[in-house]
Amino acid sequence: MTESSIYTVECPTEQAIVRALLYFEIFSYPLTADEVFRFSNCRGIAPETVFNKLQNLVEQGIVYSKDAFFLTRDNPDWVARRQVCNHRADAFLPLATRTARFIGSFPFIRSVFVSGSLSKHCMHADSDVDFFLITEPGRLWLARTLLVVFKKVFLFNSHKYFCVNYFIDTEHLEIAEKNLFTATETVTLLPMYGKEWYHAFCSANPWAWEQYPNAGFRPAENIKKHNAGLAKRSLEWLLGGKTGQWLDEKAMRLTLAFWKKKFSHLEHDHFNLALKSRRYVSKHHPLNFQEKVLKTFSARVKEMNIRPLDPNR
């Protein structure tokens, strides 16, 4: 790409297209035309218009096209790598579906989503299967502890297929941190269990679909509703009342104390964001990938001389 070609991206739609490509290129992940439409902030524009703008950018040498994919760098290795990751995701998805339903059988779990790379139809060789969970209020930390104990005892603490790293409860469905990273993660969550709570979650987070007006909701017609069987209902009854409340508070205190000791090197603000811990939310992202992604994206947008996104567009 030449220096002068950077300054030809003046059209707002083309600016939005390039922003979408730049964001996913942080993960070396080129996009199809349909995905560019889905992940660009282009309101009220038909997919055909976005495709035509893409072709215009290709003709200018600002965007490259290989097979069915588009990218701002002439790097065909990314296309081959993406295809391998897509095939691997196809193999992992049935396992993730079974695991999500199994997680849904645990006490106080109301809904289970696949998050992370698999929710975007991508699995690298070292990727984990990440899950985002919604729990009963007042029992989030107890539910989390039961799942972690299962993982440690029966899965030998393996994260590969059972990474439960984000919990919220049914009374706090809105995601507090609102930025491009969290919007992307929110609109790409893949519902696996408790579809009624997926719809409630989407309704509680309209800000994410304002960032991605063409994303739509993920298909949930064939997702099982939350339906506690006898064993789950019995355990929830036994762990209800003051006993369950005490156990939940105890589980939170012990987990938070362990995290503070393990991640004592983290600054206070970094810790509170990456390992957010409240009675109604638990986030375990100690590497704070969100901050790294947003900084990288900001640098790439500046390098390409792309205007920042106007949230009022």
Image (cartoon, rainbow, N blue to C red):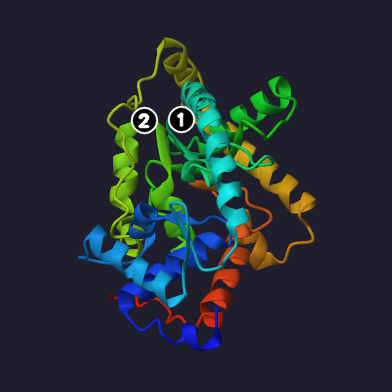
Image mark for residue 109: 1
Q: Amino acid at mark 2?
A: Gly
Say above or below: 238 vs 304: above
Q: Quadrant of the N terminus?
A: bottom right
Q: Residues within 10 Å of mark 2 (few under 14, many from 20)?
A: many
Image mark for residue 194: 2
Q: Quadrant of the C terminus?
A: bottom left
Q: Amino acid at mark 1?
A: Ile
Say above or below: 259 vs 128: below
Q: Residue at x 67, y 27 (%)?
A: 151
Say above or below: 261 vs 18: above
Estimate the x, y position of residue 312 in percent, counting from the top left.
29, 76
Image mark for residue 117: none
Q: Residue at x 24, y 60 (%)?
A: 48
Estimate the x, y position of residue 9 in percent, counting from the top left.
40, 81
* Depth check, front residue: 306 or 181: 306
Say above or below: 110 vs 300: above
Tag 2 secondary structure: loop
Q: Look at the numbered discs 1 and 2 and tell me whether their residues touch, using CB distance below 8 Å.
A: yes
Q: Nearer the viewer, mark 1 or mark 2?
A: 2
